[in-house]
Amino acid sequence: MPKLKTHKGAQKRFSITGTGKIMRTKVGKSHLRVNKSKRAKSRFDEMLPLSPKDTKRIKRLIPYGV
């Protein structure tokens, strides 16, 4: 069986926890941050679990859980 290639864009955007959950970053993190409040900016730093509908699709892009 040949090796599967990791999608590098997905590898940078998603991380997999020890229990196997896929975590995603929030959008709007870098653009126009000057206008946002301190509280809003700090909320961008937290990672959120991926929705169950997208999990199967993203797992295919990151086959080895990099």
Image: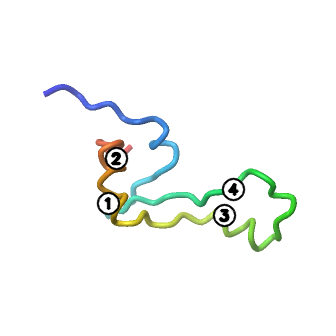
Asked whether the beta carbons under mark 4 and mark 2 sit within 8 Å of each other, the answer is no
- Residue at the spot of label 1: 20
Q: Nearer the viewer, mark 2 or mark 3?
A: 3
- Residue at the spot of label 2: 65
Task: Assess disc 2: are there few (<14), some (14-19) or many (≥20) residues with their C-alpha within 10 Å of its C-alpha.
Answer: some
- Ranked by sequence position, the earlier of labels 1 and 4 is 1
Instruction: Spot the residue most to the right.
Output: 34
Q: CA distance from mark 1 to mark 4?
A: 25 Å
Relative to residue 12, is residue 4 depicted above or below? above
Tell me which colouring the rendered structure shows: rainbow
Relative to residue 20, is residue 60 depicted above or below? above
- Residue at the spot of label 4: 29
- Ranked by sequence position, the earlier of labels 2 and 1 is 1
Name the residue type under label 3.
Phe
- Residue at the spot of label 3: 44
Task: Estimate the x, y position of residue 37 in percent, counting from the top left.
Answer: 82, 70
Q: Nearer the viewer, mark 3 or mark 1?
A: 3
- Ranked by sequence position, the earlier of labels 2 and 3 is 3
**Which residue occupies 23% across, 28% down?**
3
Q: Nearer the viewer, mark 1 or mark 4?
A: 4
**Which residue occupies 45% across, 42% down?**
11
Numbered disc 1: secondary structure: loop
Task: Estimate the x, y position of residue 45 in percent, counting from the top left.
Answer: 64, 62
